[in-house]
Image: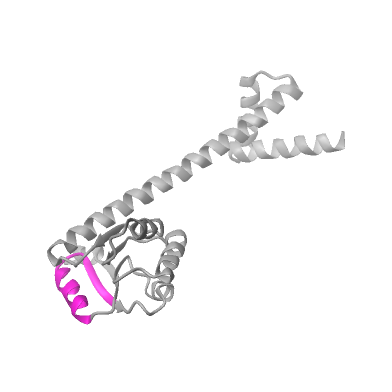
Amino acid sequence: MQKQQLNELNVLLIEDDKKKADILMSALDHSQYCIKHVASSGMSLLKQVEQLQPDVIIIDVESPSRDILDSLSIISHANPKPVVMFSEQEDTETINQTVKSGVSAYIAGDINPIRVRSILDTAVARFSEYQALKSELVKTKQKLSSQRVVEQAKVWLMETKSLTEKEAYHRIRKMAMDNSQKLEDVAKNILSLAQMLEKSS
């Protein structure tokens, strides 16, 4: 019981039709998805998300409005969450705009209660995978940026101190160890010094 509570995901449902809301709540009964908050599409989505901090968002609308899409874009950048949208709109442009705004799964047509749980499972899994890839991309970019700075500092030491590449690297590494700094930070300091010397010469 305690394990189920720990894995429970708090769901915000945007639904104007109370009958449909009841159907969704019933479909997700005894699952990890707990619809604790139901709001209408006329309310501010940003405000709802900010106040309630849901783990998952389900939106059922006839057609996604510009306000909803803009709000989802902001949420996707500032505080991304798995979002599942049910809508009657089936045109490609609407689907593309919705996915671009950060929706994890877009389902056109009527809600099939039997499929709701598997749709949410898929959306949450895809969202987690996408976030992991985004995080890995950020780390890779940071690593490449750090390597580029160290390379520039090495080149400057090689040219100004007549060092080999290996000697330049060891000098940066020793400075980093002596000062308990990262290689990147030492390299930045060296490049700052190089800029100062160039300006004063």
What residue lies at 42% left-to-right and 60% top-to-bottom? 76
Nearest the eye: 172 or 152: 152
| Magenta run includes residue 33 | yes
How many numbered badges does the structure rendering display?
Answer: 0
- Viewer-proximal residue, 105 or 33? 105
The image position of residue 32, as x and y in percent, is: 20, 64
What is the quadrant of the C terminus in the image? Answer: top right
Residue beneath the point at 65% across and 36% down = 187
Q: Position of residue 24 (x, y in %)?
A: 19, 72
Residue 37: x and y, percent? Answer: 29, 77
Above or below, 188 against 125 in this view is above
Q: Residue furthest front?
A: 91
Residue drawn 14% across and 67% down?
113
Considering depth in this image, is 170 or 92 the residue closer to the camera? Answer: 92
Task: Answer with left or right where residue 84 lies relative to residue 174.
Answer: left
Residue 5 is situated, as x and y percent measured from the top left of the image, at 22, 67
Left or right, 170 with respect to 15, comes to: right
Q: Is residue 179 visible?
A: no
Q: Quadrant of residue 10?
A: bottom left
Q: Report the front residue among 16 and 156.
A: 16
Residue extent of the magenta highlight:
18-37
Q: Which residue sits furthest left?
A: 114
Residue 46 lies left or right of residue 191; in this view the side is left
